[in-house]
Amino acid sequence: MWSTRRETTDGFEASFALNHLSPAVLTARLLSALRSGAPSRIVDVSSSAITTAVIDGAPTYDAIDQDGVYAGMAVTGRAKLAHLAHNQQLARTLDSTEITVLAVDPLGPAAASTPNAMEMTPEILPPALRHLWEPIQNGMRHPADAVEAIVAAAVNPSFAGRSGLVLGPDGEPSQDLLTFLTPEVAAAAQSLTRRVLEGSLEQNKRSPGRGLRA
């Protein structure tokens, strides 16, 4: 996430591309290998940044960018919510296979003190939340603290075949983020994803070397 809006070289808002479109395309490209190597797992790293995307109501998905003030954490949260919708749909699609699809919120409401996080400014928060900037900064966790729940999702045998689970920071199933994924939000996010990736694929056919390859 960033304090100011950025774009990828192919013209997509960078946070949406990084947090949703890119892992969606990567996963699609890896599915044949995952099937060949089954039992296997897909683990998507989600984020409680989703909560900042819904502070003013459910986000819309008419286009990659949403109208209003650019607040990087909320923009990332909106992308993460779209990817959670993708994750849950993929879990249903692969339900009859030996590929387990999971998501993880590794730090809950805390933030990791990564180099990216150190570059952030209060403007990354929606205006209504900027008074929380200091507590967020003071509550940052070491990036290594995020590893435990992700590793649990990847290797804990108790999660084999339990597609669709979202694990919290303690490595146990949680409904916290799923409460924001209403059927309407999920359908809108999935529709936008299809339009963008199909359009990118078509553009790539016309101009090889450009666009996300689905």
Image (cartoon, grey):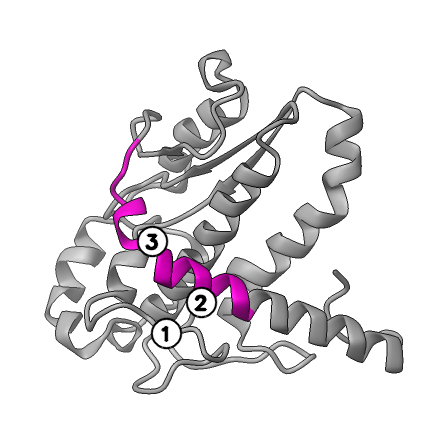
Tell whether label 2 touches label 3 (CB within 8 Å).
no
Name the image quarter holding the C terminus. bottom right
- x then y, percent, for residue 1: 43, 66
Considering the numbered disc 1 on the image, is that residue within a helix, a strand or a loop?
loop
Q: Which residue is mark 2?
A: 188
Mark sitting earlier along the chain (1/2): 1
Report the amino acid beneath label 1. Answer: Thr
Considering the numbered disc 3 on the image, is that residue within a helix, a strand or a loop?
loop
Report the amino acid beneath label 2. Answer: Ala
Q: Is residue 190 magenta?
A: yes
Report the amino acid beneath label 3. Answer: Leu
Choose mark 1 or mark 2, whichever is in front: 2
Looking at the image, residue 119 lies above or below residue 208 = above
Mark sitting earlier along the chain (1/3): 1
Residue displayed at 37% across by 76% down: 3
State whether the magenta stretch is mostly helix, strand or loop. helix
Residue stretch in magenta: 174-192
Residue displayed at 76% across by 24% down: 37
Report the front residue among 199 and 150.
Answer: 199
Tell whether label 3 touches label 1 (CB within 8 Å).
no
3D distance between C-alphas at marks 1 and 3? 12 Å
- x then y, percent, for residue 124: 31, 73
- x then y, percent, for residue 143: 40, 42
Q: Which residue is mark 1?
A: 60
23 sits left or right of 156 in the view:
right
- Number of callouts: 3
- Residue 118 visible in this rendered orientation of the protein: no
Report the front residue among 199 and 72.
Answer: 199
- Residue 173 visible in this rendered orientation of the protein: yes
Mark sitting earlier along the chain (3/2): 3
